[in-house]
Amino acid sequence: MERFRLVFSGSGGQGVITASIILAEAAVLYENMNAVQSQVYGPAARGGAARSDVLISEKTIDFPKVTHPNVLVCLTQTAYNMYNPIIRPGSLLITDSRYVKTESKVDARQRELPLYATVMEKIGNPIVFNICVLGALIALTDVVKPQSVVSVLSSRVPENFLDMNRYALDLGLEIGRGAKQIKKD
Amino acid sequence: MAVKDYIRKRFFPHIWCPGCGHGIVLNNLLRAIEKLKLKKNEIVMTSGIGCSSRISGYVDFHTLHTIHGRALCFATGVKMNRPELKLIVPMGDGDALAIGGNHFIHAARRNIDITAIIMNNRIYGMTGGQFSPLSGYGTKGTTAPFMNIDHGFDVVELSKAAGATFVARTSTYHVKQMVDILADAIDHKGFSVVEIMSQCPTYFGRKNKLGGATDMMTFYKDHTTPVGSKEKKANPELIERGIFVHEDLPEYCNEYDKVIEMAKASLK
Amino acid sequence: MKKNIKFIQGNEVCVEAALYAGLDFFAGYPITPSTEISEHLSKRLPEKGGKFLQMEDEIASLCAIIGASLTGCKVLTATSGPGFSLMQEALGYAIMAEIPCVIVNVQRGGPSTGNPTHVSQGDVNQARWGTHGDHAIIVLTASNHQDLFNITVDAFNLAETYRTPVILLFDEVIGHMREKLVMPEKGEIELVDRLRTSLGEGIDYHPYLPREDGRLPMSDFGGVHRYNVTGLFHDMWGFPSDNPQVVHGLIRHLVDKIENNVHQIARFKEFFMEDARTVLVSYGAAARSALHITKNRRARGERVGLLELQSLWPFPSHIVREKCASAQKVIVVEMNVGQILKEVKNAVDNPEKVFLANRVDGELITPTDIKSIMRLIHGKGV
């Protein structure tokens, strides 16, 4: 597998950091891979720009930052504008259609997905938006198995929120799989 | 046990100047300890830097002579792990309330069971007579050759505001009261503060033309009054002495035991 | 899932390792980027009956752990640049009074408030010479979570062995990033317990009289032996002395007990060093970038090797000299203006062959940065 180099970006409070930690933890604890996660710190915990870097590989990971992601997730327009120039050309770029208007000049496989809208329509609680994004991300990349993410969720999420999280993950998986198939045409 | 059994005789005579009040404090502190029938192994004396801090060298207890202003922090580390021991921290006015002022108010706020003795001679003696945070407005020192324009703390009010649960004041003239107050302070379960006005004829007395040691002690006799007395109303200039605060509130080491219980319960 | 695998931040690894080493007492003051150490210990220590104190500042924190160590506890405090500056006076006290303790400094950019959430390795010399007066000190560092665990346990062991403060000099990247840690089993890493005097009550105990092997058995403060501890020069009973012979003897003891054991204290790792013509010398987070580019260049057939230092002080000059002997170029990779560079120049046969690859802008030096500097040094241009 090529080294998975993800930049997960959005705004503080969207759960960007949490989702990226869950992904990396799933790879390490349940798939026997190596992962490194780091984030940009600063007074951005709520509302400011948030960025989390995740590297996943079967080999050891030395340099722990992502300079040119081969997967980029942008959940706000600001994040999209800021980070689309660093993506490795031709790589996967996931955005949410409610938050981001993409530009065709960006050299990437862009997937604009109605993740937020679906979460609000089917669940009605934005708190699990990040887990839905994560579902779409793993459906599109196959970087880890959905079950590994479910295992991490089970250990991190309070029991009464677990079903909601699993549902959000499933919604994301479904949307992600759909997007994958369309583009194969 | 006789008072002299509490001292390390080989370090005498002490370093304090003739007429200094600190020897009187040492003497009466040992009498208070004797009154409480404490064993030498039950007492930890922690001190910082300055004339007053030298007390720790002369007593045959567990003695921890530390750095300027920080004695209470070291004492906190000892007390948290050996709560059964009596922690006594003698400090000067500069040690306790200038460089150590922050540590002093925070130790008081925690109400950790430590006895802080502030030997107030209103001057930095060890370094040769500079004004301290207790010198007061209008006094002189080697760093206030014209006039000290800094106002002094009121140790009692400061301690009360910071949360000390035992607060008292006495002087080197009132030695019987000093023994009783120190014994009560050491016996008190919580943070106790005893301010002892202690003369420095060498520097504070000389710089401020207050006469010799006897003159300065006579001043303590004539210008103090028991707390709550009528004389204070008639003459507000008088300095009150006695016990100002003596209340039982939860002590820090005991409170931390509750944290440990809660933490252990959270694992089950 | 294997139960002993964790995916956690470096600061939390430090916590796990300290607990593994037998930590009993922590006092600290919150400061980025080390705060997670306090946060985790405030929960983990009382769970095992240990004690966590949040003090009024870093000065009080180090003083409190020194007091606690005297009573027989294994102790820790954690801070970052400005807080480490405040600790320097009490650090000197711990050196002088020979109190075992471990101090973590998760470095940020400085001087002053500097760059709180960004990486730097600017405190290397402060860790060595921050406190006043002649002294020796042990300073350790690490570049990944497994090493961080081991080196933290090591710090506690060395503190007990040499009766000295040991400084763990980490950085923001290592402290904050998450990666895999395989938790060692109990007993897997040897622990050094405090050397306590075997003398019973009533028998004269000399707290500062070294044994023949140089070690000084301790007696838990507040126990059966009464003695004095001071920051002044002192005799074997711990009483102040300005006798020139006593002062000289104590200074020599404090310095020699560490400097003379540099061979035992030295910790390092080497990668592709056998035939290396270009040797990178690095430590901490910078060593990760150095390792990345070393592997990358090796894959292209270039004879590049990496010497990763895990003990910075006492500086392992003998190791650096030996490992760099046949190198044509030595490149020190660090995130400061050349604090270890000077030591490497002093250690090698020819200082002219030593170069600096650094970054001081708050960003982690990248493999590309190092590659560019290597090309320049080799006259290949960028």
Image (spheres, coloured by chain):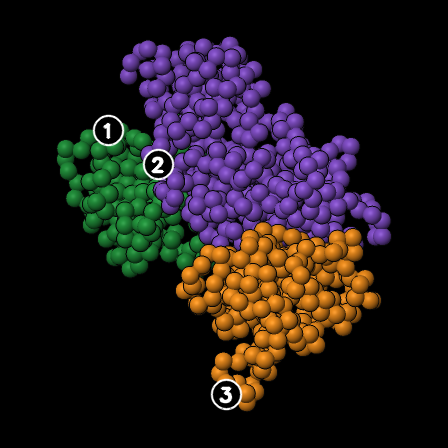
Query: Which amino acid type is shown beneath numbered disc 3?
Result: Lys
Secondary element at image label 3: helix
Residue beneath label 1, please?
A: A90
Are the residues under badges 3 and 1 in a single subunit? no
Q: Is residue A51 depicted above or below B200 in this figure? A: above
Residue B233's tag is 3
Mark pair 1, 2: CA separation: 30 Å
Residue at (52, 34) in percent of width and height: C128
Q: Which residue is mark 2?
A: C362
Residue at the extreme left:
A104
Q: In the rendered image, is residue C24 in sight?
A: no
Image spot of residue C10 (x, y percent): 48, 41
Query: In the rendered structure, the residue with mark 2 lies on which chain?
Result: C
- In the rendered structure, the residue with mark 1 lies on which chain? A
Left/right placement of residue C143 relative to residue B241 reads left
Q: Nearer the viewer, mark 3 or mark 1?
A: 3
* B78 to the left or right of B13: left
Q: Residue at x 46, y 15 (%)?
A: C351
Q: Report whether residue A127 is seen.
A: yes
Q: In the rendered view, does C177 fall on the left or right side of A112?
A: right
Instruction: Work out whether C75 lies above or below B140.
Output: above
Name the residue type under label 1. Answer: Gly
Output the letter for the chain in green. Answer: A
- Label 2 is placed on what type of residue? Gly
* Chain in orange in the render: B
For the point 55% across and 69% down, the residue is: B210
Front residue of this view, candidates B38 and B97: B97
Q: Position of residue C241 (x, y in %)?
A: 69, 44
